[in-house]
Image: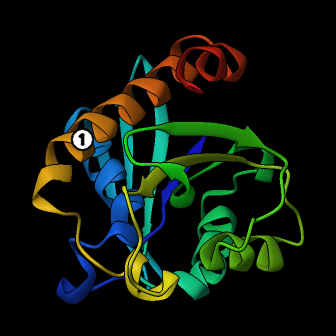
Amino acid sequence: MIFVGLGNPGEKYSETRHNIGFKVVEKLIESSKIVDIFKKKFFYAWKVEIENKEIIIVKPKTYMNESGKAVKVALDFFNEKIEDLFLIHDELDIEIGKIKIIKDKGPGGHKGVISVIENLKNKDFVRIRIGIRGEKIELSYIDYVLSPFLPEEKEIIEKVKEKTVNAIKEILRSNLEKAMSLYNN
């Protein structure tokens, strides 16, 4: 299995809403035993052991709207199937603090997901969507996703990162359907 967190590279974007996918995979790496590390042209990757399974965790080096290029190269490099891909990303349609796990669905306007589907020519993979929508949005959607979380949202974000890591562990321990029933709220 290969878990890819979506985000934008660089310090400028590090703490933005759009980078929650990166933040989750960083937390996942922290709670795993690292077996190997890969630094490639289009991505960083870690082979880790978690829940008695070996998985691959990937952070693309590309910008969000070119994520598909990095995902395709990573899948080819690790010889992984599309069905074993888990894409972790921010979702503006979901309230902050909630997650939703889906499979084989359209991109819903998310530029990173659109890029992945276009590059793979397939949407038959799992997406772990992490809500980033706060109380009110007073910026354009582009400016909003590239803005940092508000101070009062930081605790919620810490909890949702933990919840997402627990959902991934449940997928590894049990199966996708059980994780969906427990964490899709």
- Give the image location of residue 139, x and y in percent: 40, 84
Give the secondary structure at mark 1.
Answer: helix
Q: Three-letter amino acid code at disc 1?
A: Ile
- The N terminus is located in which quarter? top right
For the point 36% across and 81% down, which residue is it? 146
Q: Can residue 135 be seen from the camera position used here?
A: yes
Q: Residue furthest left?
A: 151
Quadrant of the drawing holding the C terminus: top right
- Number of marks in picture: 1
Q: Position of residue 29 (x, y in %)?
A: 28, 44
The residue under the point 59% across, 20% down is: 179
Between 38 and 141, the one lying in front of the other is 141
Residue 127 is situated, as x and y percent measured from the top left of the image, at 65, 48
Q: Is residue 93 rendered to the left or right of residue 12? A: right
Q: Say which residue appears at 17% left-offset and 84% top-offset.
A: 11
Asked if residue 38 shows in the view, the reply is: no
Residue 145 spot, x, y in % from top left: 41, 76
Q: Which residue is mark 1?
A: 156
Camera-side residue of 22 and 59: 22
